[in-house]
Each structure stands twice: as C-alpha cells, then as structure tokens.
Image (cartoon, coloured by chain):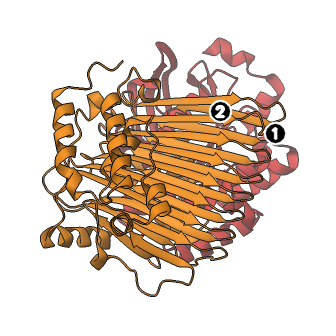
Chain colours: A red, B orange
Amino acid sequence: MSLLEVKDLQVRVEEREILHGLSLTVNPGQVHAIMGPNGSGKSTLSHVIAGKPGYEVTGGQILFKGEDLLEMEPNERAAKGVFLAFQYPVEIPGVTTWNFLHAALNAQRKARGEDEISSPAFLKKVREVAKSLNIPQDMLKRGVNVGFSGGEKKRNEILQMALFEPAVCILDEMDSGLDIDALRIAADGVNALRSPERAMVVITHYQRLLNYIVPDVVHVMSKGRVVKSGGKELALELEESGYAQFEDAA
Amino acid sequence: MNVVAKTETGRALSDAFAVARDRLPGKGKIADQRRQAFDAYERLGLPHRRIEDWKYTDLRALMREVLPLAPAPDAAALGRAAAAVKLRAIDGVRRLVLVDGAFAADLSDLGNLDKGLTIRPLREVLDAGDGALSTQAIATDVSNPMIALNGAMATDGVVIEVADGTVLVQPLHIVHVASGTAPASMFTRSLLRLGRDAGVTLVESYLAGEGAKAYQAHDGLIVSIGDNARLDHVRLIEDSVDAFNISSATVSLGAHAHFNTFGLTSGGHVSRYQLTVTCAGEGSKVETNGVNLINGTQHADTTLFMDHAVPHCASREIFRAVVDDRAHSVFQGRIIVRPDAQKTDAKMMTRALLLSDDAEADNKPELEIFADDVTCGHGATTGALDESLLFYMRARGLPEKEAQALLIQAFVGEAIESIASDALREVAIATAQRWLEARA
C-alpha cells in the first residue's frame, strides 16, 4: 500500500481555488521532490496535508496508509506519523524547547496508546538526537525557536523529526533563509533519517537543495497541478530551462 | 448626593449592624470608630458604575446586597473548614485559620512562636482595648464604602507583629475559609507590622468548605513595613465560583523597605481586590504582580493605587489576565508621583488574553505625575491566542487544549516568576495548573 496518496485534490482559500485536482502517490522509502514557481500551490499542499485551518477542500482526498487524513485533527495526523517541517518555524516565548518536545512526544504516544516517556528517559533520548545534529544543550532550555538563527530553527525542525520518527516527512522550503553551510548541516540531518520505511516529500523552489537531498522522483507543479514527473534529472533540466515552459502547459 | 442609600437592602443592613454591634469586639473608642465607618458606608451605599472607581465593578448590579453576618462556626462547620484547609495545605508554613470570620485556634498553629513574633486574634486585641494597636487595626478609609463597611463590621482577624531585626524563615499563612452552607457575610480584618530590618513571607488564601457557595468574604489587611524591612506576599483566591470576595490591603513602606506581592484569582463569582501601596520612606521598592484565570461568568477586579510620596523609590507592576467564556477581568492601576517624589522609577504592564468572543478585559492605567525628574511608563495589550503558534503545536501532536494550556502557562509565567520563594512559586503554578486542567 502507498504511504501517502493525494487524489485529485481541489483546495480553496477564501473563494479562490489554489489546487485544481492535484494527485501524488508516495511509497515507503521514497524521496519525492516537488518543485515549482512561487504561487504554484506547493506550500498550500503541505499545509493541507498537515491540517492547517483556513483551507477548504472542495474535492478529492488524501489517504495516509489507506486512512482518510482529511478527517483527522492536525494532532491526530502527527500521532499517526505525518510530520511537516515548517518553512517558517514559529517562536514560542515562555515555552522551553525541552518542555514542548516532551509534551508533544507524550501526546503522540498517548494518542497511539503507548506509555508516556519519563523525564530522564526523554532527556537521554533528546540529548542523543541533539548531539547528532550539533544542537547545543542550552538551545533546549530556551523558548521554542526564540532567538534562534535561521539555521538553528531548521535544525530544531529536524531534531523534532528525528525525535518523533514519523512515517512521512514534508519539508516545506527547507532551504529558505539558509546559507550553504547551514543547508549542508540540515540536509545531512535529513539524509540520516532516510530509511526503507520512511518517505519524504521535499518542497523546494530551487534545485540547489536537491544536490544535498537527492530525490527518487521529481514533480513539477504549476498553477495548482502536477504538470510533469520524472527522475532526479528533471530537477537539473529545470535548472537549465526554468519554469516558463510549464506555465504554458498548466 | 446618593439618593438610593435607603433602599430595602440598605435598611436591612442598618438593622443588621444594630443587631451585630453587640457581637463586634471593641468598646469605647473602637465602637465609635465602627459607628463612624458604618455611617460613612450608609451615606455612600453599595458602590455602582456611576462612581468612577467602580465603573467596571458595579456591586449594586453584581452583588445587590450585603448579606447578614455569618454565625460563629459550630463543630460541623469547623470540620468542613478543616477538610478544605487540609486539601490546600502548604508545606512548611505557620497556618492561621479564620473560619466564617472567626479565628479558629484549633486549626491554627500558634505554638513555639519565633522570638520577636507576636500573633493574636483581632478579637482579643480589640477586647483588651490595646489602644494604639486597636486603633491602627480598625482604622478605616471612610471614602471607600467597602473598606468602611469592613472596618465597621470586622468580627475577627489576626494581628501580627514582627519585632525589629526579626527575619522569619517560616512563611505565615492566613487561610480564610467559608464553611456555612447558608449564604452569609464574613468580615475579617488583619494587621501586620514589620519592624526595622524585619523580614516576613505572608500567604493569604481564600477557600470554601464543602457546601459553602454564595457567601460574601469581606476582608481587609493593613500592613506597615519598617525601614529596611522586607515583606513577600502571596494571595490566592480560590473561593467558590458562586462567592463574593471584596478585599482590600493598605501597605505602607519605610525607607529602603521592599514589598513583593503576587495575587492569583481563579475562584469567586465576583471579586474585587483594592491594593493601596504607599512608598513613605526613600529608597523603597515595590513589585506588584497579579494573574487572573477566570471563566464562566466570573468577574475579577484588581484595583491598584501606587502612591509615590517620597523620592528615590521604584515600583513595578506586571498583571496578566486570562479570560474565558463570558468572564470579565478588570485591572485598574493608578500611579501617583507626588511633587517631592523625584527620581521615582514606576512601570506598569498589563496584558489580557481573551479565550472566547464573549470574554471581556478592561485595563485602566492612570499615571498622575507631579514631579519632573522621574521615569514612568505603562503599557496594556489585549488579544487572543496566536493561531499560528497553536497550529505549530498541534502539528507536533499536541491536542488543542493542551497547546492552549502551554501557551497560557507561558503567558502568566512572567508574573508567577516574580514570586521569590521557590516553594510558593510552585504552589502558584500548581493552582494555575488546576485551573487549566479543569478547562481541558
């Protein structure tokens, strides 16, 4: 069975249709890249998969392991194994990263009927993951993303991905705001999480990121649809020729 | 002119006072003070919205009448009170319990008092006719009707004296418990005097025994903090959600004295806390912090009057209100800097978080500055929980109520952090936690 299946998805925001029948099938172990110009609907797709309020699905469906994802609350989706790495991770003053991650992990475990993880066990786990991502301990004691640099915020997203061990990870414009060194660290973190059971959907505007996270499948989005799919070479082709040819196709 | 003073309820209270007089401790001069205070209340009547100070808390509409005095608690009432006290017991404190407006010696801890510490029930002090102390304890600002009424009717309370240089390690905890199952009024008045270089932590809490619902707690506290002395004060209103709590505290600081106060209101149907703080000695420092956590149809009003009378004093106010359902939070903060009070540093910040469309928060900051070399400022914000933060947290697996709870804890955190004692900060956090769990 496919891990994630988007079928003929139609989505409106405030009376304006953004996605006009988008389809996408992601199997375990695969890394899909979704590329496209600004306004093609890439971020809308990631938001609808994660369950962000404000989007009206007017047609189609999203299945996750065969279950109707659109019927679930955002927190239920997270507990089932859907993870969205935000393009712009928010800052939450007054809520320490440590406390937030512990509460979130336990909420997910509770929703899955698993035992909660104790503070010492959690501390050990989060320290290991943080170390592997070069995240200093004191970042965990600060408010979530408060005063973090762009690179630190993205690393914090990957830390959470590693901690929650989701089945499908949606990475929304992970490269935005990152210099080349920060991008490499973040990409290494993502690559370390690639596994035969896990799938990733990498949404990006630029081909650059795909030099570091090499996809199995590349989709080109334009005007709310997937207009072309192919192998990783499609990304290079786009880098040469740009998106203009597809805007006509859409 | 107050044409409605003689309403039916006004007359009933007048009769009640006449009846109660014999039960009220203190004769001679004290009885005269009470009479004058009651006359002042009668002239003014229950405050209403056309009086500026009571614009948001119209007691005539909200409370309608002052209930007659509660009877002295019987054994069953004391038993219910003891259970309520036990449920909210704080470890390591010296407990002083007032049940239905009467000092409950059996529930209180008066043994092995530290050297330099004196604690006596107000009734005993007034009955003994202890001149200056009695006069101070029952002293009343007759321009404020509810303080006047409290002075007129106070049946008991605690009188605490801390001698010069005495620093108490063990906090004192005054617990007000309502245990009567029939609605009635309790009037209590307490006095705390700290000598020079003294140090005390005082906790006050307000609780309901099982079955106590629509009672009225009328309380007053008078505090003088000597030169170079320090008072840490924590106040927890956990009254029944049908109850009324009308309280006042009047605090005066000597030179280089320090007053740190924190109040948390999560209980009570209608509460009004009037805090007047006077920096009367140079170099004194005041930190006033408060949190309202209210829902349903609760109404919670904190009215602060910060009086900078002398130079070189500093005051900080941090107030946070979390308002759900149709609840109504009021914060009025008036800072006055008198002409001599040069080099005053006074700042006030109030923020309200509205959790529903019908919730209401009124912030009324007032700065009156008569000195020209001062640093003063205030700010106020009102808003809802940030949807983008909520979505982020939900996308990480937190159910909506849990995500809200974390954001609410963070919102009130800055005010709670101001509590100096680790143990009491934990008590305040636990109280807030109970409120959050009850709404989940």
Position of residue B382 relative to residue B395, above or below, is above
- When the figure is inspected, residue A42 is found, relative to residue B141, above or below; the finding is above
Q: In this view, does B140 lie above or below B62?
A: below
Cβ atoms at labels 1 and 2 below 8 Å apart: no
Residue A191: x %, y % from top left:
70, 57
Q: Residue at 30% of width from left, 73% of height from top? A: B86
> Residue B436, percent across and down?
39, 52
Residue B342 has which mark?
A: 1
- First-in-chain label (1 vs 2): 1
Q: Residue at x 39, y 32 (%)?
A: B356
User: Can residue B184 be seen by looking at this rendering?
Assistant: no
What mark, if any, has residue B128 been given in the picture?
A: none
Residue underneath mark 2: B379
Q: Are marks 1 and 2 on the same chain?
A: yes
Task: Decide if residue A236 is on the left or right side of residue A113.
Answer: right
Whether residue A229 sits left or right of residue B429 in the image: it is right
Q: What residue type is labelled 2?
A: Gly
Identify which residue is drawn at 24% across, 45% down: B242
Q: Mark 1 lies on which chain?
A: B
The alpha-carbon separation of the residues under discs 1 and 2 comes to: 22 Å
Q: Which circle, 1 or 2, is nearer the viewer?
A: 1
Amino acid type indicated by mark 1: Gln
Q: What is the residue that sits farthest to the bottom in this orientation? A: B112
Q: How many numbered discs?
A: 2
Badge 1: few (under 14), some or many (20 or more) residues near its Cα, within 10 Å?
Answer: many
Closer to the camera in the image, B192 or B379: B192
Q: Which of B56 and A170 is in front in this view?
A: B56
